[in-house]
Image: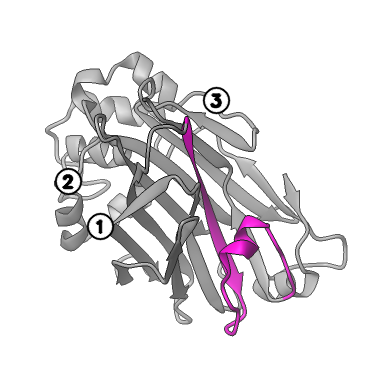
Amino acid sequence: MKRIVNYFLLCTMLAGCNYQGIHLQAQQLDEKRQGFDKEEVESFIRESEKVNHAINPQLKNKDIVNLFLLGLTKEEMKHMDSEELHFFSNKSSINKWNNLNEQTLRDIFKKQTNDQIIQCDLYKQMLCTASTIYTVQKKKVMELTMSISLLNREEPRYAVVLSYKWLTNPQEKKANFYGVLTTENAVVDYREFYSYYKTYKDASHISAKHYDKPYQSSVVGYVIKNSLSKENSRHFGYLYAEIVPSDRTHKYIDVEGFYIHADEDHSFSFQDVLDAGVNDDMVMFKSPITRIAIKK
């Protein structure tokens, strides 16, 4: 999967460009899910009551497994503050402990395909998650992770998490937009809308911005607008939302994550994201589509 982007914009954003053809290339990760490998998660399940000082001393291993099954990444858990922990304390993917076994973990960590559409049946699989690394001239630039879990089987209600992590320090901070596209049969519960952007030079001094409502929303998605810290070099964050189908006559809901790095005066448009439009004032990263099966 390759997308051609503006040469001068990329060379402003990154160091080390030369005058060869410039491509933004995306590749899905196979070995880990949300920063964890299968053996790590298995060890957390075996010692569920043990406090995990390596990741976050406020969390026991069972809390980490729960957050993992909701779609949060290891880095997000590592830097979670008390406000975030309180928000997620009453969130839980259904039947997590009753159904956790070797087969459910194999399903979560099974090899990803390179398909543009990832099939997700949460009545058969506990968590659908996929990470994509974006590179320019073999230099890693961005990692996007889309994760979906089932919160309520009867409604049904889904937790959708978009995580992003800059793998380089953008030379120009610019305007940044990140969000999720959905099919029109998805209804977002904005009472459960929650997003954090975090940044640092030294991991012991984290700066954070919290958002509890979107910059824009429509029947096709929702988006946050954010400015990157000019003083810091590490940038990451996530957007958590809960969606329900508007009716069950449709067989599926599609969700797709995106991140836009643009000039300060860039005017955001959902249509540009839908069209995957790229122009001289922006770079766009998009995840594969995840197709969530709806049970009637």
Location of residue 156 by image quarter: top left
**Is residue 99 something that shows in the picture?**
yes
Q: Residue furthest left?
A: 49
Labels 1 and 3 touching (C-beta < 8 A): no
Q: Residues within 10 Å of mark 2 (few under 14, many from 20)?
A: many
Q: Nearer the viewer, residue 128 or 74?
A: 128
Residue drawn at the location 38% of the way across and 24% of the way down: 125
Asked whether the residues under the numbered discs 2 and 1 touch, taking CB atoms below 8 Å apart as contact, a structural biologist would say: yes
> What residue is rendered at 56% in x and 38% in y?
29
Residue 265 falls inside the magenta stretch:
yes
Q: Residue 283 at what x, y percent from top left?
A: 66, 66
Label 3: which secondary element: loop
Q: Read off the residue under disc 1.
A: 80
**Residue range corresponding to the magenta coloring:** 251-280
Q: Amino acid at mark 1?
A: Met
Q: At label 2, which amino acid type do we have?
A: Leu
Q: Which residue is mark 2?
A: 59
Q: Quadrant of residue 203?
A: bottom left
| The quadrant where residue 61 appears | top left
